[in-house]
Image (cartoon, helix red, strand yellow):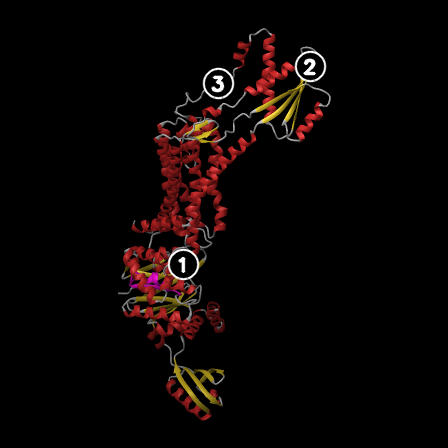
């Protein structure tokens, strides 16, 4: 039984198509990454999953049944735009949000304290929310989403604006939740985060599903045709006949091999050549990164677009958010 | 229902706890009392005693005028209840001291000197009639031209003196002349339906203003609180757990309960103050805030319904706006009908049972304030009260039905107005 199942979902705002014919499902105990640049329809899809908005057509099922509001007690949601009552004291706020999800006041209070200790923000409990730093507010919001022990955890851009230490603290919690058998969905535009942690992904671009499936499946469809070399010396090996294109960096090169049935042999032959030209400190054969796959897929669905343009779309988004 | 209660409770507790609530609860009565006492105080200050000089060669006339002016002594001192909060009444006549002088060389210069030195407030110069039987001429020279009251009093007193003189001239006995000059007094209080008309008018007026003020203030609070949740994006967290209708209803109930608390505090304070002091003395008349049971009952009925009506409109406005600034522009929809009630109040007070008053009081936006006023001072037929309540309740249901849909769509929309087709689709969803 899938925890979340979207079938041919479509949502149009006024004149803008936010989501078009979107289908994917999330299995229990899975970490699911919803990927795409800003404005691609991630938040719209998530809102439809939890009944904040309704799809214009298509169906949404949660926990194996068509969406009903009564299942929302089993869902924890962290919205993209953080929302807390500014003037309210943090503990009262957590108790209020916990009791809205059906916890008793005493239980909500107990769990809030445990969580705050876990995330190292106990000193924030008696303070007003507006007096906290942005990162602390985000942790509070994160706790609020988990307080009622939901079976489905939905986090819209959970790491944006967090420093690496706190981001990995939260990622650890999410990984632990997955180990407890809960389904975790998070959306991000940071492909590298997903590559390491997700069991399954869906890539969307301009409201259309570009790619979906388990991480292993997605990667398996792509040949291991990327070679990363770190070397000292002559780079003449870049003219090896198996090399389709290469990017040269100081002491390093990223190579794409020509499509060929004998890809493994080609890479070994490249290595042999390289050893003759230079001193090799690292030689790694990989599949294309998610980012590369994404760019390639988008290019395939919208022919005529320059890959650099698409890459720029992904890149600028990252830069602007990270800055 | 549980969520609704939680939301209403949060709204209530968070609001009552704020400094703003405590300040408005304390300051508004203080400011209002300040206005009332202040204006009465200023009024009484204006009536400080006067000193005028009458210059006349006709000694008899001057002395008659002197005794006429000095006999008009204020009588309110005897009426003042020792227990009551005594306000120097605005309507009190000033005490006038009159000196009489014969015109002589240098008199005018002397009097002008006295004016300069603040010794006197003015002098009245009476020139005898040039021909026998004609009117003498009167010239009053005041120290300050802003003193409007003294010339009025002088002229009234002169009229009485001259009239009495003429009556005596016609051979009417002094006692009869006095009887003829007695002012006619109309006593309205015994004709009134209520025991103490002035007292109940003041009380009704206070309640009317209270209703107007609280509905406006707390209606705006509902709208502002919705905008606040929109801008802080908290509603998105809430919507993932609660129905929008519950959110809206909880908010209206929570904010309304705060308003009721405040009104309750004020009313209790007024009643306690009145009970302990025995009444408020205004214009020499002791006002005891006295209200009949039905008046209080109707006040709360119309107040609650009025609040529901206007807060539902406010909730819709809040849901449609994206910022406080936008709300400021939409405010007019909330304020206009309330302000209209104030404008219509004059007509209604003058003729509470005229057709125009009766019709206005039945129009739902005006019903809470105007029908309440009619119930308090007029004679609405029972069917009119029933009809006004029915129309108001029906329109509240309609409004809440509409508003909750607008709210549902509005809180998630940025810069986009919901259209009818969309509203219908939202309607089907539950």
Q: Is residue A317 magenta?
A: no
Tags 3 and 2 on a common chain: yes
Tell me which label, 3 or 2, sits earlier in the chain: 2
Residue labelled with disc 2 = B129
Front-lying residue, B100 or B383:
B100
* Residue lying furthest top: B171
Q: Chain of mark 3?
A: B
- Say which residue appears at 59% left-offset and 9% top-offset: B168
Residue labelled with disc 1 = A129
- SS of the residue at dot 3? loop
- SS of the residue at dot 2? loop
Residue labelled with disc 3 = B185
> To which quarter of the image does residue B27 belong?
top left
Q: CA distance from mark 3 to mark 2?
A: 35 Å
Q: Is residue A211 above or below residue B238?
A: below
* Residue lying furthest left: A1
Q: Is residue A304 visible from the viewing direction of this image?
A: no
Q: Is residue A155 magenta?
A: yes
> To which quarter of the image does residue A78 belong?
bottom left
Q: Range of the magenta residues?
A: A142-157
């Amino acid at each position: 039984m899938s925890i979340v199942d979207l079938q041919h979902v479509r949502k149009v705002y006024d004149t803008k198509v936010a989501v078009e014919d979107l289908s994917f499902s999330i299995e229990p105990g899975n970490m699911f990454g919803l990927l795409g640049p800003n404005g691609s329809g991630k938040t719209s899809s998530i809102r439809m999953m939890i009944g904040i908005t309704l799809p214009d057509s298509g169906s949404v099922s949660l926990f194996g049944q068509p969406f009903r509001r009564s299942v929302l007690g089993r869902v924890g949601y962290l919205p993209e735009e953080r929302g807390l009552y500014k003037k309210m004291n943090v503990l009262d706020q957590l108790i209020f949000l916990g009791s809205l999800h059906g916890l008793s006041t005493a239980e909500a209070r107990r769990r809030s304290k445990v969580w705050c200790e876990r995330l190292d923000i106990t000193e924030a409990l008696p303070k007003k929310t507006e007096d906290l730093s942005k990162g602390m507010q985000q942790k509070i919001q994160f706790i609020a989403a988990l307080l009622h022990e939901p079976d489905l955890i939905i986090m819209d851009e959970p790491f944006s604006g967090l420093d690496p230490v706190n981001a990995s603290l939260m990622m650890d919690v999410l990984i632990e939740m997955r180990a407890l058998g809960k389904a975790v969905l998070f959306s991000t535009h940071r492909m590298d985060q997903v590559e390491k942690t997700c069991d399954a992904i869906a890539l969307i671009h301009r409201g259309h599903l570009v790619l979906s499936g388990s991480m292993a499946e997605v990667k398996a469809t792509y040949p291991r045709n990327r070679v990363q070399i770190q070397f000292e010396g002559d780079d003449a090996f870049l003219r090896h006949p198996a090399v389709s294109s290469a990017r040269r960096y100081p002491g390093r090169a990223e190579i794409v091999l020509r499509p060929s049935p004998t890809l493994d042999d080609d890479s070994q032959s490249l290595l042999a050549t390289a050893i003759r030209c230079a001193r090799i400190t690292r030689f790694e054969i990989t599949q294309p990164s998610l980012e590369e796959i994404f760019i390639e897929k988008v290019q395939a669905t919208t022919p005529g677009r320059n890959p650099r343009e698409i890459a720029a779309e992904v890149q600028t988004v990252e830069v602007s958010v990270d800055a | 229902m549980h969520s609704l209660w939680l939301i209403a409770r949060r709204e209530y507790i968070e609001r009552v706890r704020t400094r703003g609530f405590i300040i408005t609860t304390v300051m508004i009565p203080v400011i209002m009392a300040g206005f009332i006492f202040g204006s009465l105080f200023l009024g009484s200050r204006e009536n400080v005693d006067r000193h005028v000089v009458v210059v006349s060669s006709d000694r008899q006339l001057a002395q008659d005028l002197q005794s006429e002016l000095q006999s008009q002594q204020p009588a309110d001192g005897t009426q003042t209840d020792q227990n009551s909060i005594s306000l120097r009444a605005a309507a009190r006549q000033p005490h006038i001291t009159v000196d009489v002088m014969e015109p002589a060389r240098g008199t005018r210069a002397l009097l002008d000197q006295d004016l300069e030195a603040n010794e006197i407030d003015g002098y009245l110069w009476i020139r005898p009639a040039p021909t026998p039987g004609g009117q003498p001429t009167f010239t009053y020279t005041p120290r300050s031209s802003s003193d409007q009251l003294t010339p009025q009093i002088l002229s009234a007193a002169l009229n009485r003196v001259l009239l009495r003189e003429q009556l005596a001239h016609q051979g009417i006995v002094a006692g009869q002349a006095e009887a003829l000059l007695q002012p006619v007094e109309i006593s309205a209080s015994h004709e009134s339906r209520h025991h103490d008309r002035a007292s109940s008018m003041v009380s009704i007026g206070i309640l009317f203003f209270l209703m107007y003020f609280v509905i406006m203030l707390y209606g705006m609070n509902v709208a502002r609180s919705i905008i606040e949740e929109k801008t802080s994006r908290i509603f998105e967290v809430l919507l993932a757990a609660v129905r929008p209708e519950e959110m809206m209803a909880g908010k209206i109930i929570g904010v309304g309960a705060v308003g009721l608390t405040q009104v309750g505090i004020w009313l209790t304070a007024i009643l306690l103050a009145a009970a302990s002091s025995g009444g408020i003395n205004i214009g020499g008349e002791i006002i005891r805030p006295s209200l009949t049971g039905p008046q209080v009952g109707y006040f709360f009925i119309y107040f609650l319904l009025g609040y529901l009506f206007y807060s539902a409109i406010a909730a819709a406005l809040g849901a449609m706006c994206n910022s406080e600034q936008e709300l400021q522009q939409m405010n007019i929809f909330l304020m206009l009908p309330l302000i209209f009630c104030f404008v219509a109040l004059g007509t209604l007070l003058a003729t509470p049972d005229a057709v125009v008053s009766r019709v206005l009081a039945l129009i739902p936006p005006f019903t809470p304030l105007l029908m309440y006023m009619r119930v308090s001072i007029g004679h609405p037929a029972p069917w009119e009260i029933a009809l006004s309540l029915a129309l108001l309740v029906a329109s509240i249901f309609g409004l809440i039905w509409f508003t909750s849909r607008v709210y549902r769509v509005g809180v998630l929309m940025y810069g986009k107005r919901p259209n009818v087709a969309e509203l219908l689709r939202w309607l089907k969803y539950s």
